[in-house]
Image (tube, rainbow, N blue to C red):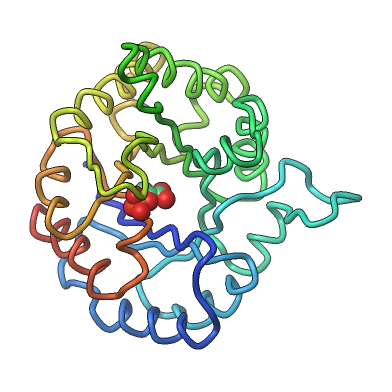
Amino acid sequence: MREFLIAGNWKMNGSSAANVELVAGIVAGVPTGSGFSLLVCPPFPYLASVVEQTKGSPVKVGAQTVSEHDKGAFTGEVAPGMLSDVGCDYVIVGHSERRALYGETSEQVAAKFQAAQVAGITPILCVGETLEEREAGTTESVIDEQLGAVMDAAGVGAFAAAVIAYEPVWAIGTGMTATPEQAQDVHRHIRAQLAAQDGSIAANVQILYGGSMKGENAAGLLAQPDIDGGLIGGASLKADDFLAIAQAAAGIQ
Ligand code: PEP
């Protein structure tokens, strides 16, 4: 039985003071019940303090990206071992902003995915198509290329300790959410791609939806059979908005 994972990607937002308030609000409002976990992904400088503040709570902490290298002359980069050293459980890899703004290739994303796992961190692999790609009817082939690069490099077995996030680029930060049916179609496709190689891995892997998810649309998306949670940007920056999505997950269990 797959649990829901409700993950907040804070992107480049926050401050020491604002984070203390946000985390306190989230920790205080975690819905009762089981069948879901909560995760927050602050910017690098705040990881250690958010880990400290969430200790003893059910809220886990992750990073937003990571280097594929384990140490050395890579100015400005952060190694996977450093993330585990400060208490991170997860790291997002291949977010569309990293692919589009920083030129990360699918091969590089695969290397980051593998490096995270070596350090004991669970990678959240983001995949998703642009609007042009959707309109051209190439959504599935785009997903296959992004997912396939990681399956080729790491093997399907690696998805026993990983999470996938389907994030249509056209829905990220735009207020344009995929309909539950549009999202479910792609989630089903992703699971089928994995199932072609290993049915048990496919049945157990969590596949999150990301793209303007909020309290008002979360229940419909999370009710879909292949949607196992959300990767949430904008609505993760206010405790009440984030908790409304967590409540939707708790209500479905
Ligand atoms: C994201 O950044 O991964 C995301 C889904 O953002 P938003 O929820 O703001 O669309």
- The correct choice, above or below, for 81 with respect to 225 in the image is below
Residue 163 x/y as whole percent = 42, 41
Residue 232 x/y as whole percent = 34, 54
Residue positioned most to the right: 73
Side of 164 relative to 181 (left or right): right
Side of 132 relative to 243 (left or right): right
Residue 231 seen from this side: no
User: Which quadrant, please, contains the C terminus?
Assistant: bottom left
Q: Residue at x 16, y 52 (%)?
A: 218
Foreground of the two, 96 or 112: 96
Foreground of the two, 138 or 38: 138
Q: Quadrant of residue 244?
A: bottom left
User: Which quadrant, please, contains the N terminus?
Assistant: top left
Foreground of the two, 108 or 90: 108
Q: Residue at x 50, y 68 (%)?
A: 13
Q: Residue at x 50, y 59 (%)?
A: 11
Q: Residue at x 36, y 85 (%)?
A: 24
Q: Quadrant of residue 183?
A: top left
Residue 246 x/y as whole percent = 21, 63
